[in-house]
Image (spheres, rainbow, N blue to C red):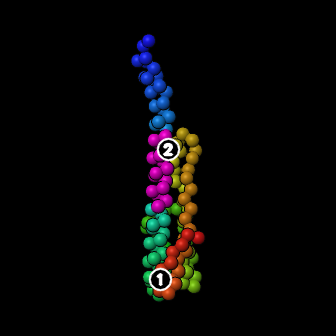
Amino acid sequence: MNNKGQTLAIFVILLPVILFLIAVAIDMGNFLVQKNKYEDEVKNTIKYGLKHLDDEDISNKITMLLNSNVDGQKQINIKDKVIKIKVSKKVNSIFTNIIDTNYQIDISYIGYLDDKKIIIKKE
């Protein structure tokens, strides 16, 4: 019996599946990296705001800092020494041109001072 062609046939059949799984892994990795970047920027902005709550026009400073580092829709609320920031953005997928898929990043954090210690939590 001659089995030389069977391995090639199996490889040709499985190659698109393997490539698809690699593309999905890269796509999800890209999404998670962007989400992590946005979360870090929001946390850093809240830390900055809490350290400078007594400054004049802190709301505009926080807005400028967030706008320079994060795209998408942003909501900033400063009330009673509590800072709330919500960010949402659609991230394109690798497969956007093939099938209309986008990922949605929704981040919401709240920060406040507790005995001069900065507390930042997901809302």
Q: Position of residue 110 (x, y in %)?
A: 55, 74
Q: Position of residue 50 (x, y in %)?
A: 47, 81
Seen in the picture, residue 72 relative to 43 is either above or below; the reply is above
- Tag 2 residue: 24
Residue furthest to the top in view is 1
Image disc number at residue 117: 1
User: Could you tell me the amino acid type at mark 1?
Assistant: Lys
> What residue is rendered at 45% in x and 20% in y?
6
Seen in the picture, residue 79 relative to 1 is either above or below; the reply is below
Seen in the picture, residue 64 relative to 106 is either above or below; the reply is below
- Residue 57 can be seen in this image: no
Q: Position of residue 120 (x, y in %)?
A: 51, 75
Which quadrant: the N terminus?
Answer: top left
Q: Position of residue 9 (x, y in %)?
A: 46, 22
> What residue is rendered at 46% in x and 57% in y?
34
Pointers 2 and 1 in contact (C-beta within 8 Å): no
Q: Which segment is the magenta one?
A: 21-36
**For this view, does 7 lie left or right of residue 92?**
left
> What residue is rendered at 59% in x and 70% in y?
123
